[in-house]
Image (cartoon, helix red, strand yellow):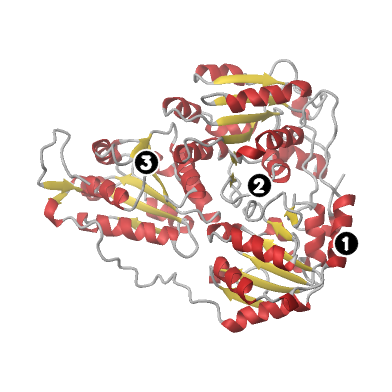
Amino acid sequence: MAIAEDTGTRQSTINGAEIMISALIHHQAKYVFAYPGGASMPLHQALRKYRDEIRTILPRHEQGGAFAAQGVSRTTDSVGVCMATSGPGATNLVTSIADAKLDSVPLIAITGQVPQAVIGSDAFQETPMVEVCRAITKHHYMITDIRDVARVVKEAFYVATTGRPGPVLIDFPKDVQLDSIPVEELDLDPPMYLPGYHPELQDAAPEQVRQIIAAIRRSKKPVLYVGGGCILSGAAEELKKFAEKTQIPVAMTVMGLGAFPGTHDLSLHMLGMHGTAYANMAVDESDLLLAFGVRFDDRVTGKLEEFAKHGKIVHVDVDPSEIHKNKEAHIPVVADVKHILEELNKALTDEDVPDTKEWHTLINGWKEKFPLKYADYSTEIPQQHAIQTLWKLTQEKNPYIAVGVGQHQMWTAQYFKFDKPRHWLSSSGLGTMGFGLPAAMGVQTAHPNELVIDIDGDGSFQMNVQELATLVCEKLPVKILLLNNQHLGMVVQWEDRFMEGRRAHTYLGPVDHPEALGGGSGMPGEAIYPDFQTIAKGYGIASQRVREKDKLEDAMREMIEHDGPYLLEVICPYQEHVLPMIPSGKTVREIITE
């Protein structure tokens, strides 16, 4: 990388901001989603200087930029990078950082900070970002010396990507950005200093592998319970090989979708609160639960002491703090999931494969008795039908799908079958509305020639609707399937199920409308509020609205084939519920299927 002024003359010194950007480039960062301000202007000048080596994308909100950076991290081997100024710019990153922490997403968040001389004086746009983010980052830095910049960046990438991945904050005071050193003193690969961080894992002991195989050999009703750790470790191929060899059915968490092909005969699809009835029943009846890369989240387990209580639990995870945290494991293994699966596949013999014919017969009976289903409207378009139609039309294209948060998120998890990892993006741990559009924006940046679709709800979509401008200005052809029921659907569902249908601020239209109090027909009227077609036009985005089922496929084909970004708004009834549903804190025996 040349260190030169725009004029082409050789420079003798380099400032802290330029070192930061040079270090990002050195560590293979290809994109940075950055919104400028007073405390980050030197960084933006450096980004301008090195624009041929790193692409800067200007989001329309810092939260959108950080979610876009997640889109890069979640679908590539690169680490997403986002940047904001001090104060409100920095605090606008907080939700996205917390989101990355809960979903184990590597992320580098760089925040400008006021000069060190005024830190602590309540200076203009000062916020103590290290303190604000201490509990929601994997690690955090404030750079106080220009000679630490390259080391901090190197450590940040290392910490973010090793062990259990996560976000790292770098708070960067403006005076250090402007300070300079002679160019000849620059070292972009200095030694790291992380004396308390040891992410390196020893290989699993051979006796642990033998214990797991022995448990498999003795089982009659085994189930694989796999999560995001299988995707992060790149274990999808080994998992498929292992499942096919042992004929053990596979249930996936919402973070694990795509770790095992959703269309495979052994797939039980998603388990948990809105998972399939047969996945939850299989786990409940299992005599061996192989929990690989999971954390026994409450949305999966329900009533914890009743979860998988009939069998032996094998828990494999790279993070030792997850072992025994929520559920006691009979065979705990701190190891990389891919490595364990490789060792199991090497060691398994035909004699170790359990006889699961009766088990599969029982599960197939559950599949026939409790399939995923929804109401068959004559002309209206239920959200499930729209999602299933999109899956059928795009299955061969293997699109990247990002979602917002709400009913549409769970219906996409149920009805869009993912056969490959890293093609499904969901804010799963934090459940952040507004995630879908900017995440898709980041994915499209990293995969410019692929089909990228944001499946969103009208409530979630409006949280970061401003990123439509970024799609147009940066020429990112993201497709948006907007399922509009004019309600906060998931909250409405809970009102219907547990609060006698009393509406409490879940209708997104005028407050004096009958729907606001739970009246009405269940279908939005002719006057749709807000008018998303006008909004799309205002941003320069092609769009279409459809409300009749017989027009849906043609509208979807037009969306898919359009050259640029496209918004397809589908008007949907609001009274549909995401089913099955295991009420919070309950068990599969209390599952709601109707």
Q: Please, what secondary structure does the residue beneath circle 2 have?
A: loop
The kind of residue on which mark 3 rests is: Ala
Task: Give how far across and how far down residue 402 sits, in percent.
Answer: 58, 40
The quadrant of the image that shows the C terminus is top right
Whether residue 569 is visible here, answered yes or no, is no
- Mark 1–mark 2 Cα distance, whole angstroms, equals 25 Å
Q: Which mark is residue 84?
A: 3
The kind of residue on which mark 1 rests is: Leu
- Which residue does the numbered mark 1 point to in the structure image? 362
The kind of residue on which mark 2 rests is: Phe
Q: Which mark is residue 418?
A: 2
Q: Please state if 143 lies on the left or on the right of 140 as rendered.
A: left
Q: Examine the image and state in which quarter residue 474 appears.
A: top left
Q: Please state if 589 lies on the left or on the right of 233 as rendered.
A: right
- Mark 1–mark 3 Cα distance, whole angstroms, equals 54 Å
| In-front residue for pair 283/109 | 283
